[in-house]
Amino acid sequence: MTPTLVIVPGLGDSGPDHWQSRWERKFGAARVRQDDPENPTPQVWAGRLQEVIEATPGDLVLAGHSCGVLTIVHWARLTGGHERVRGALLVGPTDADMTETYAQYPGVQGMAPTPLEPLPFPALVVASENDPFARFERAQAFADAWGAEFVSAGEAGHINVASGHGDWPDGEVLLSEALHAWTPPDIVRF
């Protein structure tokens, strides 16, 4: 059985044209919906992720974007992970410790400090070389700390609708490759 994709949005819940929302529709993914999508806190957002994981049967692959990445790494730190989570695609991680972001998105500071513990499952960090919410070198340092693979998306902004990533075919390729690496060979993949 193919693992179920769990979409973990960032601030604003990734609107209808965002690649995460398109993947939800295309792949029949589960989605984490926060009660307050503008004001994250590690405990509340990780708690909601845990609820979705518990309510979604079978093996799971998490796909986080921006503060959704922070949700996943905080959840892993707080819970130690879950045996059905096979891996995570971590796209455009926001640096919660980058205080320049707070003026535009004050809610981000609620996710500071960014956890730097190894993740208990395989992960792939995809980062842009000109992301305004995390310096490229910092995203590489996150991947190293989390024990994750790292891929550059080139100069792709924040890898969201504003940077031209509604449809994100390269992301689907990365997701497919990650699933291939994280699941047994007899499993059907996206």
Image: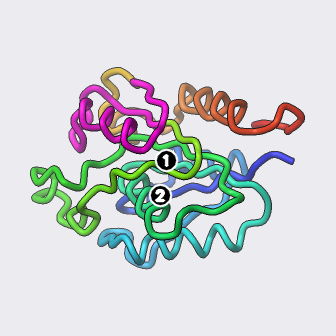
Task: Give the residue type at disc 1.
Answer: Asp
83 horizontally vs 47: left or right:
right
| Helix, strand or loop under label 2 | helix
Q: Residue 49 appears at what percent x and percent y?
A: 54, 68
Query: From the viewer's perspective, is the residue at label 2 or at label 1 nearer?
Result: 2
Q: For the residue labelled by badge 1, is the local secondary structure a helix, a strand or a loop?
A: loop
Q: Residue at x 69, y 45 (%)?
A: 26
Q: Residue at x 44, y 63 (%)?
A: 77
> Which residue is pictured at 58% across the width and 48% down the height?
121
Q: Picture coordinates of residue 92 (x, y %)?
A: 37, 41
Depth check: give the residue in front, 125 or 103: 125
The way the protein has been coloured in the rendering is rainbow
Location of residue 65 in the rendering, given as x and y in whole percent from the top left corner: 43, 48
Q: CA distance from mark 2 to mark 1?
A: 22 Å
Closer to us: 130 or 139: 139
The residue nearer to you, when weighing 135 against 141, is: 141
**Image quarter of residue 163:** top left
Q: Disc number at residue 17?
A: 1
Q: Which mark is residue 72?
A: 2
Q: Is residue 62 left or right of residue 76?
A: right
Residue drawn 72% across the image and 31% down it: 180
Q: Is residue 98 left or right of residue 2?
A: left
Amino acid under disc 2: Ile
Q: Is residue 165 left or right of residue 57?
A: left
Tell which circle, 2 or 1, labels the residue nearer the N-terminal end.
1
Q: Are marks 2 and 1 in contact (CB under 8 Å)?
A: no
For the magenta stretch, what is the residue range?
A: 125-152
How many numbered circles are shown? 2
